[in-house]
Amino acid sequence: MTKIAYPDYEDLGELLIGSKILVSPAEVHGLISGLLAAGLPSDGDWMSQINALINDGQGLPVEIKKQLKIVMEATHSGMSDSLLGFQLMLPDDEVVVEERTEALAQWVQSFLVGFGVVQNDLNKLSEDVQELVKDFTEISQLSSDLDDDEEENEQALFQVVEYVRIGAITIFAHLTASDSDQQQPTLH
């Protein structure tokens, strides 16, 4: 399994806030994951897409660009990993479950934004991908108003995170496989 080395969640959050970029690390990672899953090449002009979406097209500080490049490389590596090494960039398990639930909803919302920037006609996609996008849309509406049973909330969050993780990998695999199928020359 590929070791995914994201920047520290809290440090990246402080860097973003310090630069007056009002998105969470979960939102940034969701956006990058959505762009990649939709077929945007990791070596393409993804930084301008990110810049436009999180900073209104204003120039991003050098340190943030450096951290986003690390996030992009780790995300692409994880999504490409045949052993399913991709992980969502979310707050640590020590953070209260309500905050982690909110971060997951933000991650999924941002994934859908990134995905929609690249893929604007869902009808052209496979039924599996369409169903996952529909499920992600429902998950993006998660509420941080949870039951009183902490253990049950933890288990439910774990299951949803795992579903989203595998769903993102599946979407990436479907769209990168169809892209490579289209690029393969036909032999006669």
Image (cartoon, rainbow, N blue to C red):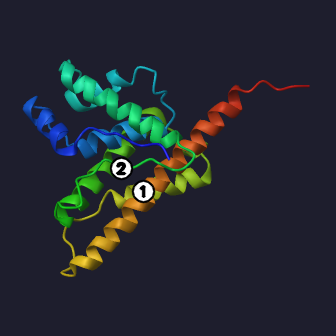
Q: Residue at x 38, y 64 (%)?
A: 160
Q: Looking at the image, is 34 positioned above or below residue 72?
A: below
Q: Residues within 10 Å of mark 2 (few under 14, many from 20)?
A: many
Which quarter of the figure has residue 115? top left
Name the foreground residue: 62 vs 23.
62
Distance between the alpha carbons at the discs numbered 1 and 2:
8 Å
Task: Write down the residue under mark 2.
Answer: 88
Q: Mark 1–mark 2 contact, CB under 8 Å?
A: yes
Q: Is residue 37 left or right of residue 148?
A: right
Q: What type is the residue that disc 2 sits on? A: Leu
**Residue 153 percent across, percent down from the top left:** 27, 74
Q: Is residue 116 visible?
A: no
Task: Write down the residue under mark 1.
Answer: 164
Name the foreground residue: 26 vs 2.
2
Q: Residue at x 24, y 65 (%)?
A: 143
Q: Residue at x 46, y 56 (%)?
A: 134
**Element type at marker 1?**
helix
Q: Is residue 115 left or right of residue 104?
A: right
